[in-house]
Amino acid sequence: MRIVLRIGGSVVASPVNTDLMSKYAEMVQTLKGQGHEVAVVVGGGALAREFIGIAKKLGLAEQAQDEVAISVSRLFAQLFLETLGGMGCGKVALSLDDAADFLSTGKIMVMGGLKPGITTDAVAALVAESVNADLLVKGTDQDGVYNKDPRKHADAVKLDHLSFDDLGKVFSENKHKAGIHQIIDPEAIKIMKRERMKLIVVNGFKPENILAAVNGESVGTVVN
Protein backbone atom coordinates (compact mmCIF):
# COMPACT_ATOMS: atom_id res chain seq x y z
CA MET A 1 0.00 0.00 0.00
CA ARG A 2 1.19 3.53 -0.72
CA ILE A 3 0.61 5.69 2.34
CA VAL A 4 1.00 9.42 2.97
CA LEU A 5 1.36 10.15 6.67
CA ARG A 6 0.75 13.67 7.90
CA ILE A 7 2.27 14.27 11.34
CA GLY A 8 0.76 17.36 12.95
CA GLY A 9 3.18 19.93 14.35
CA SER A 10 0.70 20.18 17.23
CA VAL A 11 1.69 16.59 18.07
CA VAL A 12 5.49 16.35 17.75
CA ALA A 13 6.47 20.02 17.83
CA SER A 14 4.32 21.91 20.37
CA PRO A 15 6.49 21.63 22.46
CA VAL A 16 9.12 19.52 20.68
CA ASN A 17 8.69 15.89 21.77
CA THR A 18 11.84 13.95 20.87
CA ASP A 19 10.57 10.68 22.40
CA LEU A 20 7.45 10.82 20.26
CA MET A 21 9.47 11.71 17.16
CA SER A 22 11.63 8.61 17.78
CA LYS A 23 8.50 6.46 18.20
CA TYR A 24 7.18 7.80 14.88
CA ALA A 25 10.48 6.93 13.21
CA GLU A 26 10.19 3.35 14.54
CA MET A 27 6.55 3.11 13.47
CA VAL A 28 7.33 4.34 9.93
CA GLN A 29 10.21 1.87 9.70
CA THR A 30 7.73 -0.87 10.76
CA LEU A 31 5.33 0.16 7.96
CA LYS A 32 8.22 0.06 5.48
CA GLY A 33 9.19 -3.38 6.83
CA GLN A 34 5.61 -4.57 6.19
CA GLY A 35 6.12 -3.72 2.51
CA HIS A 36 4.31 -0.36 2.37
CA GLU A 37 5.61 2.69 0.53
CA VAL A 38 5.59 5.65 2.91
CA ALA A 39 5.68 9.43 2.43
CA VAL A 40 5.73 11.64 5.54
CA VAL A 41 4.72 15.31 5.74
CA VAL A 42 5.66 17.10 8.97
CA GLY A 43 4.09 20.31 10.27
CA GLY A 44 5.77 23.22 12.06
CA GLY A 45 3.38 23.47 15.03
CA ALA A 46 3.59 26.18 17.67
CA LEU A 47 7.09 27.26 16.64
CA ALA A 48 5.89 27.96 13.09
CA ARG A 49 3.00 30.02 14.49
CA GLU A 50 5.43 31.85 16.78
CA PHE A 51 7.55 32.82 13.76
CA ILE A 52 4.42 33.92 11.87
CA GLY A 53 3.73 36.23 14.83
CA ILE A 54 7.28 37.62 14.68
CA ALA A 55 6.97 38.18 10.93
CA LYS A 56 3.66 40.00 11.52
CA LYS A 57 5.27 42.27 14.12
CA LEU A 58 7.98 43.09 11.59
CA GLY A 59 5.19 44.19 9.24
CA LEU A 60 5.85 41.42 6.73
CA ALA A 61 3.17 40.42 4.21
CA GLU A 62 1.21 37.16 4.61
CA GLN A 63 3.30 35.45 1.93
CA ALA A 64 6.49 36.19 3.89
CA GLN A 65 4.81 34.94 7.09
CA ASP A 66 4.00 31.69 5.28
CA GLU A 67 7.58 31.36 3.93
CA VAL A 68 8.96 31.59 7.47
CA ALA A 69 6.52 28.92 8.70
CA ILE A 70 7.55 26.65 5.80
CA SER A 71 11.20 26.95 6.85
CA VAL A 72 10.28 25.85 10.38
CA SER A 73 8.32 22.82 9.11
CA ARG A 74 11.32 21.83 6.95
CA LEU A 75 13.58 21.94 10.01
CA PHE A 76 11.30 19.44 11.77
CA ALA A 77 11.19 17.36 8.58
CA GLN A 78 15.00 17.30 8.53
CA LEU A 79 15.14 16.19 12.19
CA PHE A 80 12.67 13.41 11.43
CA LEU A 81 14.54 12.33 8.31
CA GLU A 82 17.84 12.12 10.21
CA THR A 83 16.11 10.00 12.86
CA LEU A 84 15.04 7.49 10.17
CA GLY A 85 18.68 6.77 9.26
CA GLY A 86 19.34 4.76 6.10
CA MET A 87 15.65 4.10 5.41
CA GLY A 88 15.09 7.82 4.74
CA CYS A 89 15.38 9.54 1.36
CA GLY A 90 18.62 11.39 2.22
CA LYS A 91 17.30 14.94 1.99
CA VAL A 92 14.03 16.74 2.61
CA ALA A 93 11.84 16.93 -0.50
CA LEU A 94 11.21 20.55 -1.54
CA SER A 95 8.76 19.95 -4.40
CA LEU A 96 6.12 17.46 -5.57
CA ASP A 97 8.59 16.22 -8.21
CA ASP A 98 11.14 15.59 -5.44
CA ALA A 99 8.49 13.71 -3.47
CA ALA A 100 7.65 11.39 -6.37
CA ASP A 101 11.33 10.88 -7.28
CA PHE A 102 12.40 10.10 -3.70
CA LEU A 103 9.50 7.70 -3.20
CA SER A 104 10.40 5.86 -6.42
CA THR A 105 13.86 5.05 -4.97
CA GLY A 106 12.14 2.80 -2.40
CA LYS A 107 13.09 5.06 0.51
CA ILE A 108 10.82 6.83 3.01
CA MET A 109 10.06 10.30 1.62
CA VAL A 110 9.96 13.19 4.11
CA MET A 111 8.96 16.82 3.55
CA GLY A 112 7.64 19.89 5.36
CA GLY A 113 5.87 22.85 3.77
CA LEU A 114 5.81 23.50 0.05
CA LYS A 115 4.76 27.03 -0.88
CA PRO A 116 2.91 30.05 0.59
CA GLY A 117 -0.88 29.86 0.65
CA ILE A 118 -1.17 26.21 1.63
CA THR A 119 -0.64 24.35 4.91
CA THR A 120 1.14 21.02 5.36
CA ASP A 121 -2.34 19.37 5.25
CA ALA A 122 -2.71 20.56 1.67
CA VAL A 123 0.88 19.50 0.94
CA ALA A 124 0.05 15.98 2.17
CA ALA A 125 -3.06 15.93 -0.05
CA LEU A 126 -1.04 17.14 -3.08
CA VAL A 127 1.63 14.50 -2.44
CA ALA A 128 -1.08 11.82 -2.13
CA GLU A 129 -2.57 13.05 -5.43
CA SER A 130 0.78 13.15 -7.28
CA VAL A 131 1.94 9.68 -6.17
CA ASN A 132 -1.52 8.06 -6.36
CA ALA A 133 -1.56 7.11 -2.68
CA ASP A 134 -4.00 4.50 -1.40
CA LEU A 135 -4.44 6.18 1.96
CA LEU A 136 -3.76 9.46 3.74
CA VAL A 137 -3.45 9.25 7.54
CA LYS A 138 -3.25 12.32 9.75
CA GLY A 139 -1.98 12.18 13.31
CA THR A 140 -3.46 15.16 15.14
CA ASP A 141 -3.96 16.45 18.69
CA GLN A 142 -7.54 15.11 18.90
CA ASP A 143 -9.01 11.58 18.76
CA GLY A 144 -10.55 12.27 15.37
CA VAL A 145 -13.02 14.70 13.83
CA TYR A 146 -15.76 16.08 16.10
CA ASN A 147 -19.07 17.70 15.21
CA LYS A 148 -17.69 20.91 16.80
CA ASP A 149 -14.42 22.02 18.36
CA PRO A 150 -13.93 19.83 21.47
CA ARG A 151 -11.50 22.42 22.91
CA LYS A 152 -14.38 24.90 23.13
CA HIS A 153 -17.45 22.66 23.54
CA ALA A 154 -17.73 20.04 26.30
CA ASP A 155 -20.64 18.36 24.46
CA ALA A 156 -18.69 17.84 21.21
CA VAL A 157 -19.18 14.35 19.75
CA LYS A 158 -16.50 12.37 17.88
CA LEU A 159 -17.60 11.21 14.44
CA ASP A 160 -16.47 7.74 13.30
CA HIS A 161 -17.19 8.26 9.63
CA LEU A 162 -18.15 11.18 7.40
CA SER A 163 -17.95 12.41 3.82
CA PHE A 164 -15.82 15.30 2.53
CA ASP A 165 -19.05 17.30 2.04
CA ASP A 166 -19.87 16.86 5.73
CA LEU A 167 -16.30 17.74 6.67
CA GLY A 168 -16.55 21.20 5.14
CA LYS A 169 -19.58 21.97 7.31
CA VAL A 170 -17.83 21.03 10.57
CA PHE A 171 -15.11 23.69 10.34
CA SER A 172 -15.13 27.40 11.05
CA GLU A 173 -12.53 28.43 8.43
CA ASN A 174 -13.19 27.81 4.76
CA LYS A 175 -10.08 29.42 3.29
CA HIS A 176 -6.36 29.51 4.02
CA LYS A 177 -4.65 32.10 6.19
CA ALA A 178 -1.14 32.08 7.68
CA GLY A 179 -1.04 30.03 10.87
CA ILE A 180 -4.50 28.51 10.37
CA HIS A 181 -5.07 25.86 13.05
CA GLN A 182 -8.00 23.54 12.57
CA ILE A 183 -8.00 19.78 12.34
CA ILE A 184 -7.97 19.72 8.51
CA ASP A 185 -7.16 22.67 6.29
CA PRO A 186 -9.92 23.76 3.84
CA GLU A 187 -7.61 23.66 0.79
CA ALA A 188 -6.66 20.06 1.65
CA ILE A 189 -10.35 19.10 1.82
CA LYS A 190 -10.87 20.42 -1.74
CA ILE A 191 -7.96 18.35 -3.09
CA MET A 192 -9.03 15.17 -1.27
CA LYS A 193 -12.62 15.58 -2.41
CA ARG A 194 -11.50 16.09 -6.02
CA GLU A 195 -9.36 12.95 -5.89
CA ARG A 196 -11.92 10.91 -3.90
CA MET A 197 -9.20 10.01 -1.41
CA LYS A 198 -9.54 8.01 1.76
CA LEU A 199 -8.42 9.93 4.84
CA ILE A 200 -8.17 8.63 8.40
CA VAL A 201 -7.71 11.16 11.22
CA VAL A 202 -6.30 9.68 14.44
CA ASN A 203 -4.86 10.74 17.78
CA GLY A 204 -1.23 11.36 16.83
CA PHE A 205 0.08 11.12 20.39
CA LYS A 206 -0.19 7.34 19.96
CA PRO A 207 1.79 6.35 16.83
CA GLU A 208 0.37 2.82 17.13
CA ASN A 209 -2.95 4.38 15.95
CA ILE A 210 -1.33 4.93 12.55
CA LEU A 211 -0.44 1.23 12.29
CA ALA A 212 -3.98 0.31 13.36
CA ALA A 213 -5.47 2.63 10.70
CA VAL A 214 -3.26 1.18 7.96
CA ASN A 215 -4.16 -2.37 9.07
CA GLY A 216 -7.86 -1.56 8.70
CA GLU A 217 -8.70 -1.48 12.40
CA SER A 218 -11.44 0.87 13.62
CA VAL A 219 -9.64 3.96 14.94
CA GLY A 220 -10.14 7.72 14.69
CA THR A 221 -12.41 9.14 11.98
CA VAL A 222 -12.60 7.81 8.41
CA VAL A 223 -13.38 10.41 5.73
CA ASN A 224 -14.15 9.38 2.15
Image (cartoon, rainbow, N blue to C red):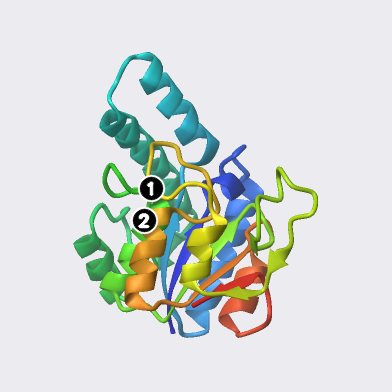
| Closer to us: 182 or 88 | 182
Mark on residue 175? 1
Q: Looking at the image, is mark 2 or mark 1 nearer the viewer?
A: 1
| Residue at the extreme front | 169
Percent coordinates x, y for residue 36 in the rendering: 45, 81
| Residue at the extreme right | 154
| Closer to us: 82 or 206 | 206
Location of residue 196 with respect to 170 vertically, above or below: below
Snapshot quadrant of residue 201: bottom right
What residue do we see at 40% from left, 37% from top? 72
Screen quadrant of the N terminus: bottom left
| Closer to us: 13 or 183 | 183
Percent coordinates x, y for residue 190 in the rendering: 36, 63
Q: For numbered disc 2, what is the local secondary structure? A: helix
What residue do we see at 31% from left, 30% from top? 62
Percent coordinates x, y for residue 114 in the rendering: 29, 49
Mark on residue 187? 2
Residue 191 appears left or right of 183 = left
Tell me how many marks there are.
2
Q: Residues within 10 Å of mark 2 (few under 14, many from 20)?
A: some
Percent coordinates x, y for residue 69 in the rendering: 38, 36
Can residue 30 be seen here?
yes
* Contact check, label 2 and label 1, Cβ < 8 Å: yes
Which amino acid is tagged 2?
Answer: Glu
